[in-house]
Amino acid sequence: MALTAPTADLTGNTIASTYDQLLILDSAAGIVENTLKIVSTQLGHSALQLDDEKVLIKGVDTNNAAAFQVTNKDDANILKCGANTLDVTLGDDLLLNTDSSVIKMGAGADVTFTHDGTTGLAIIATPVTINSVGDLTLVSTTDIALDAMGGNFEFRDSTAAQLTIDVDGTAGDIDINLKVNGDDLVFNQYDGTEVMRITDTVRVGIGATSPTATLHVDATGTAWDATEGLAIFEDDSGRQIVIGQLGIFRRDYNNDEGEIKINYTGYNGGTTRYRDLRVYDGKQGIAFAVDGSAGAVGIGTIYPVNTIDVRHNGADSDNGIMIVNEQTTITDGELLGAIGFDGADGNVPSTCLEASCFIAAYAAEDHATIDKGGDLVFGNSLIDENDDVTSTEHMRIDSEGVVTTPGATVHTITSVNNLSVNGSIPITATCVRVDANGSARTGIRFGGTGIAGQIIFVNNTGGEALTFHNTEGTALVRGIAATHDTMEANFMGMFVSDGSLWNLIAGGVDSQPDVGLTAS
């Protein structure tokens, strides 16, 4: 808006204008200090006064709306002072362009906002409260740092403390404290799914909203045979120990070298004390135990007295050690199992049949439900024999009870059923069992004179006495002229042939009880 040069009357020190506006044109000399004062002659209108080192602007409009305001060329408010208050209203931004800008508030400048051009904005006050009726958002292109300066961070709900974080704990500890009795500390995913819970009863639940133990992991939805397990422990070399429904296992190595160590170290890093290992049956009964100090394994006992100690009750499924060949087809001559005995000097054999001494069992026929015949073999290594060489079989007990060594029969057993009066005892076996007949039998003799040095054991298991005939060449000879001798029931006698007669060496014959054997 262009200003029209007004006419003015100068009376003394007063310039009076007949227009609504007063235009004072600057001169080369300028306005001399404390020489200009503009006063309205109408009550309630503004006044401007220039005094020493200050400009006084005061007044109020006719509507009592504003004591002072600054507008731009479009009449938009830039700054406004209230008529009845000390408030100042800015129409837009307040720009403080120096690197040492300070805004002070309070009668004693209790609160200051300081910008030093280096660390940014600092708010200094005790206390500082930011009260927002909506969200309070902090945005930074780098870090947002909260410094409690030795105090705590406290989270409240309607002024009631809910959670505190103490970063001033002993030895650098950071304490997270729930402030409401009965509250749990819960961690959720973005969709609200609970991940972990720490209860006020000192229990931790992972996937378990109501943990029932100090640590409760609930992997509902994971298959029982999932190879990822329920928990994975991994070291800095990528070795993984997995715990799951499948048990405890390694799954990291793509080779056969992975191992699981149990009870590897104990007290003081495993340097001073041994540790035992015990596995129970779920009903406080011991399944097996390892005595760490003795290196002994106990099956059915926690106190093994030897390297392997097996305790049993002599009952079905609980009466010893069973070695089973698990092949689905067992043929005649198949190895059923073996036990080897050897020393650590030289190679320890990988098969029991190369051990210094061994006991082995073989199938004596093709096995089936009704065919379970077997042979028992004893063998050992010869003098000066190398390691890793199959040992020599020295004795075999076959399925018929025949004992043989290479090329010779050592022992056979024959049973005689219903041996009648004047019956013969066969001499083709080394042991003859005389079974029950129902009555005493007399005139019993041997089936031949035998070979000098041949030994036969006669076991009377029949429950009736046997009376030997002593007048023929194949009869019993005891060195006396008796006509007969009687063997009581359940007695055994040992007879040796001299090539022509059988001689009783020891046995249960009534006329020679001093050399008789006890009841069999």
Image (cartoon, grey):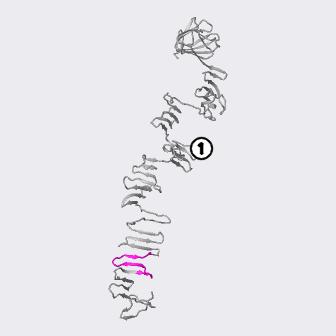
Q: Secondary structure under badge 1?
A: loop
* In magenta segment, residue 84: yes
Image height check: is 485 above or below 371?
A: above
Nearer to me, 144 or 266: 144
Dot 1: few (<14), some (14–19), or many (≥20) neighbours within 10 Å?
few
Q: Farthest residue toward the left?
A: 43
Q: Is residue 266 left or right of residue 21?
A: right
The magenta span reads 70-94
Coordinates of residue 474 in the picture (x, y in percent)? 62, 9
Coordinates of residue 9 in the picture (x, y in percent)? 38, 94
* In magenta segment, residue 291: no
Nearer to me, 269 or 500: 500
Residue 306 in sight here: no
Q: Which residue is mark 1?
A: 257
Coordinates of residue 230 in the picture (x, y in percent)? 50, 47
Image height check: is 75 above or below 509?
A: below
- Which residue is rendered at x = 64% and y = 32% of the image? 354
Instruction: Name which quarter of the figure residue 25 lies in.
Output: bottom left
